[in-house]
Amino acid sequence: MSASDMSGGRLGHHLKRWLFLAHRWIGIVTCMLFTIWLVSGLVMIYVPFPSLGKAERLAGLAPIDWAAVRVTPEEARRVAGGRPVRNLTLEMRDRAPVWQIEPWDAAPVAISAVSGNVLAQTDGASARRIAGDFGHAPVRLITALERDQWTVAGSFDRHRPLWKAELAGEGGRVLYVSSRTGEVVLDTNGMERFWNWIGSVPHWIYPTVLRQYNLVWRQVVMWVSGPCIIGAITGIWIGILRLRTGRRRYSAGRFTPYRGWMKWHHVSGLVGGVFLTTWIFSGWLSVDPGRLFASPGLSLASQISYAGADKPLTLAADALGRSATGAKLVRIRWSLGRPQVLVERGPQQASFLSGKTLTPWQTDRATIEQRAAQLVPAGHIIAVDRLVAPDAYWYETDGLPLLPVLRIRFDDPARSWVYIDPASGAIVGDTDTRRRLYRWAFDLLHKWDLNGLTQARPAWDAVLWLTSLAGLLIAVSGVVIGWRRLNR
């Protein structure tokens, strides 16, 4: 044997040794993380992070007292500065009608529909009444806070500080009230919070002390999940190296040299290792390292132009009241260059009216396409499809998305797609090449959210449980092996 062959053999031996050492010591920590993430992921299938859904919001609102409404939508908009606004919403708040103005580029403003004055910051007494009316129960305790575990996300920043209202009665229901506008922004109960301590919080590495610093939290997620990818890849490599088939089998015809927990770890790694690797890799992508999948989306200017939100309103309060009798929420917005009124009396009791005549809203596909052409200045419309069933990019994991919907495709460099509700003309979504790639790199590999599975539950549940159990067998056996190694 030549000196070069001997040198190459020693190098290969050292590399293999480092491969085994890296997997052993990285695996001791990462298998514990895998166990936590897989168990918490299964919980998240059934208990999502607390939020305030549309049905919950409507259930908590009282019907609008139209006799008390004195301020027209246009007067409320002028009080808020007269700028183009995304929405003007009328609802009852602290037992009086309130207009909430949502500018396109600023925080919302609450204006009394009785006096026309901008509402002062909500105090504790008002927050107590608002929460009690919304929750239909007495408030046991009201507390001011900046953030807690359930309101740590940046979406609540425009409402801080918040009022936390703990309701009397069973269930541990807690409401959070915005100090800026007085609206209820979150509804949680004891069961949600309990399961989220086992689900979303450990899965997302989401404790308040960390998550409140978004940049730090992103770095932690990346640097914690990164070594897990290394541990998974080295595990597959070693598993293949130690596998013997055909005539090269180990004694007694075994294809693995291991016994006991080591055997379980080896076999489960061969079976589920690829799943575990792609799953943790997609989890690492969840924070979009390097902003590889970030895209600007539709510009604010093009959305305002499409909506025609700079047009004045001529609606009178009494005429609006006659058309929206019994409504719990009235939302005025602009669509296709015209004002539009959404009247909601309940979760399944919504109607669209013209903001000029208060007659049923009408539009047509030609008008939508004509105005949509200006949404992507860098491109032209190349196709318009009417979707009547979910597809790979327009779907929900729990139920059906809005259907039918128009999918308008452009030939700009980003290959933008815009989704528009043909009934209202409202833009309901948009995507481009980067985000469509992210859909496969993250959503599919992490959630297995194919329509063939999510629309045929419990098939989706079964796939997630089987793959997760395979991963758990790898992780739990690794924890046992690592514990024994540390004890030695």
Image (cartoon, grey):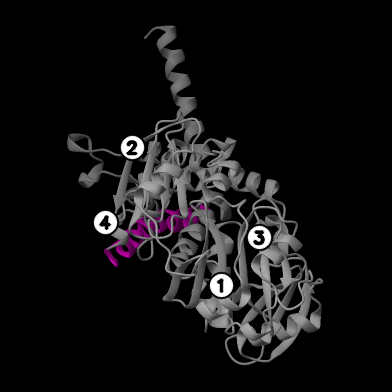
**Dot 1, crowdedness within 10 Å: few (<14), some or many (≥20)?**
many
Mark drawn on residue 240 = 2
Q: Nearer the viewer, mark 3 or mark 4?
A: 3
Upstream in sequence: badge 4 or badge 2: 2
Which amino acid is tagged 4?
Gly
Secondary structure beneath dot 4 equals helix
Q: Nearer the viewer, mark 1 or mark 3?
A: 1
Examine the rendered structure and indicate whether residue 235 appears above or below residue 80: above
Seen at 72% across and 76% down, the residue is 164
Which amino acid is tagged 1?
Val
Mark drawn on residue 102 = 3
Query: How many angstroms separate mark 2 from mark 3 (CA)?
Result: 58 Å
Secondary structure beneath dot 1 equals strand
Upstream in sequence: badge 1 or badge 2: 2
- Give, as a single range, the part of the protein colored magenta: 456-482
Tell me whether the residue at label 1 lies in contact with that at label 3, contact meaning CB atoms closer than 8 angstroms.
Answer: no
The residue at which mark 1 appears reads as 330
Magenta highlight: main SS: helix
The image position of residue 194, as x and y in percent, is 57, 75
The image position of residue 354, as x and y in percent, is 48, 64
Residue 414: within the magenta? no
The residue at which mark 4 appears reads as 452
Examine the rendered structure and indicate whether residue 211 appears above or below residue 445: below
The image position of residue 357, as x and y in percent, is 50, 67
Secondary structure beneath dot 2 equals helix
**Dot 2, crowdedness within 10 Å: few (<14), some or many (≥20)?**
some
